[in-house]
Image (cartoon, rainbow, N blue to C red):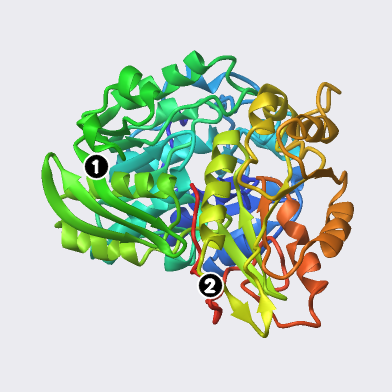
Amino acid sequence: MLDSVDLNGRPFHFIGIGGIGMSALAYVLTKRNLPVSGSDLHLNHITQRLEDLGAHIFGKQEAANLACFQTEAKSEPQVVPHGMDGDLSSLETKAKSPRQSDRPVNSPGSIPQVIVSTAVNSTNAEYQAAIALGCPVFHRSDLLAALMQAYQSIAVAGTHGKTTTSSLIGHMLLQSGLDPTIIVGGEVKAWEGNARLGQSPYLVAEADESDGSLVKLVAQIGIVTNIELDHPDHYDTLDDVIQTFQTFAAQCQTLVGCIDCSTVRDRLQPSITYSLHPESGADYTVDSVTYGANGTLATVWERGSVLGQLNLQLLGRHNLSNALAAIAVGRQLGLDFATIAQAISTFEGARRRFELRGECNHILFIDDYAHHPSEIQATLAAARLHIQKEHIQKEHLDLTQRRVVAIFQPHRYSRTLAFLSEFARSFSDADIVVVTDIYSAGEPNLGKVSGQQVVELIGHHHPHVSYQASLQSVSAFLSKTLRPGDLALFLGAGNLNQIIPEVMTTYATDRCLATTGSNPTEATPKSLSLKVDPVMVQG
C-alpha cells in the first residue's frame, strides 16, 4: 500500500491538470523528469506548456485516460478525501519526506499516483476509474507537502495577498542569485508561468487555506499576511479559519506575521512581525511613505534601525505590506537590504492582479482577481491612485475628469450571501459600478441571492450602479458608457475578463494597444510601449 507521495520515479496523473494550482505542481514534477500525465476539460496555454515539456495531456476526463497504464495486482487504494468527500481540516498529513525506495522504481507504465483537487467530485468518471484500478489517490496539498519536505521551504499563507507576496519573495530570491523553486497561484512574467524549478535548496510556495488543507504544510519559514473569513462554503465561522492557521503556524519553524491584522497579532503571535505603523513595535516597519500613481516610496526600519529606501512599483498600502513580508524573509535568509531593495524594485507583478490588459481610445483596461470585499476596496483604492496623475492632454483631448469604472462579477453564491452588506459598502472609490450575475464556481443556485440583490444593496451607498445580467449585456453597456480617460477595472475570480478583448474591439478604430494575445483568458502579458505604469498587482 502506498500511503505517502513517492517522488522517486513512480508516475503521476492529474485530474484537472490545467488548474492554476495543479499545473504548477505538474510543471515542477515534469521538470524533475518524473512521468506526468493529466486531463482537463479546458485545454489552454498552461496545458500546452506542460505538453511541450513532455507531459501527456488528455482533453477529456474519462475512464479511458487511465487505460495506458499497465494493470498491476491491486492493493487496497489509499484515498485522501478532497473537500467534496470529507473535511480536510481534520486530516493528518499523509505526505511524507521523499525517501529512497527499498524496491525497484516503478516503470512509467505502472499504475500512477493520482492527484486531485477539491474541485474534483467523487462522481467524476476518471476518479472512479483510478479507484477501480487501485491507484493511490492524493489531494494536491499532499503533493505540495511532500515537495516542501524536500526543500528549505517558505510558505505564504493568508486570506489576501498570498499570490503577490509569494511571487514577490520568489522574485527576490531569483534576483538575488538563490535560484529557488517556485509554486504560486498566478502567472509571473519573470519566470513565464506559475512555477519554476530551481537548483538551490529553497522552495517558495503559496499556501491555500480555502479547503482546510493548509494544515498539512510544514515550512521552515511561514508567512501569514492576514486572516478573514473568505470561504463560507468550507468554514462556518472565523474561529474555524483561525484554527486552521494556528495549526499551520505551529508547524512552521519561523512564523512571519502582519500585526496590522489583529487576528494574526493576537491569535498567532508570530516570531517575526511587520506593520505599516511604526508605533506598533513590529520588527519591520516603514515611515516617510509616499503612495503615488507610479508606485510607492518608503523608508524601511528593522528593529529600530533604518535599513534604507524602498522603491516599489506596486500601488497601494496593501502592496507595501506585502513587500515588508518579503523584506522580513530576505533578512531572515541573510540577504543585505540593498540586494533586497533592488530585487523588489524590479517586480512587476502577477497576472490578474491589477494587470494592465491594454489601452484603447485613451481608456485603460485593468483585470484583477479581487473577489472579497476587502480585496475590492484595496484594488479600487489603487485604481484611484492610478488616475490621480498630473492632468493629461492627448491629441487635444482634456482627460482631467478621469473616472474609475468598476465592473464586478460576484464569485460563488455562498460568498456573495455571506458578505452582502460588506460588498454593498466596497465601491466608494468607483465613479460607476456595473454588476453582473454571480459566477457559481460549481456551486448550486439555491435561490437565496442574486446579482440583482447585490446591485440593490450597493445602490443604498452608491449613486451610479447598474445591473447587467449577462456578459453580453455588460459588454454592450460598456461600449456605450466608457469614454476617453476612464479606467475600466474588471473585478472577480470568474470569467468576466473574457469580455475585455471584445470591449476593446469597440474602440478599434482608435489606437488600441493590448497586452495579451487572441485568447483573452490565457495569453501571457507582453511588454507595453504605453505611457502607463507597468503591470501592478493586488494580492
Q: Which residue is mark 1?
A: 285
From the top left corner, tell me how far across and down residue 432 is, in percent.
73, 50
The answer to which of marks 2 and 1 sits earlier in the sequence is 1
Q: Which residue is mark 2?
A: 532
Q: Which mark is residue 388?
A: none
User: Residue at the location (30% across, 59% down)?
Assistant: 172
User: Residue at the location (33% across, 50% down)?
Assistant: 323
User: Residue at the location (63% across, 66% down)?
Assistant: 48
Q: Nearer the viewer, residue 166 or 435?
A: 435
Q: Secondary structure at mark 1?
A: strand
Q: Nearer the viewer, residue 118 or 227?
A: 227
Residue 99 vs residue 397: left or right?
left
Residue extending furthest toward the left = 305
Residue 52 visible in the snapshot: yes
User: Residue at the location (60% across, 36% down)?
Assistant: 372
From the top left corner, tell me how far across and down residue 56 is, in percent.
62, 59
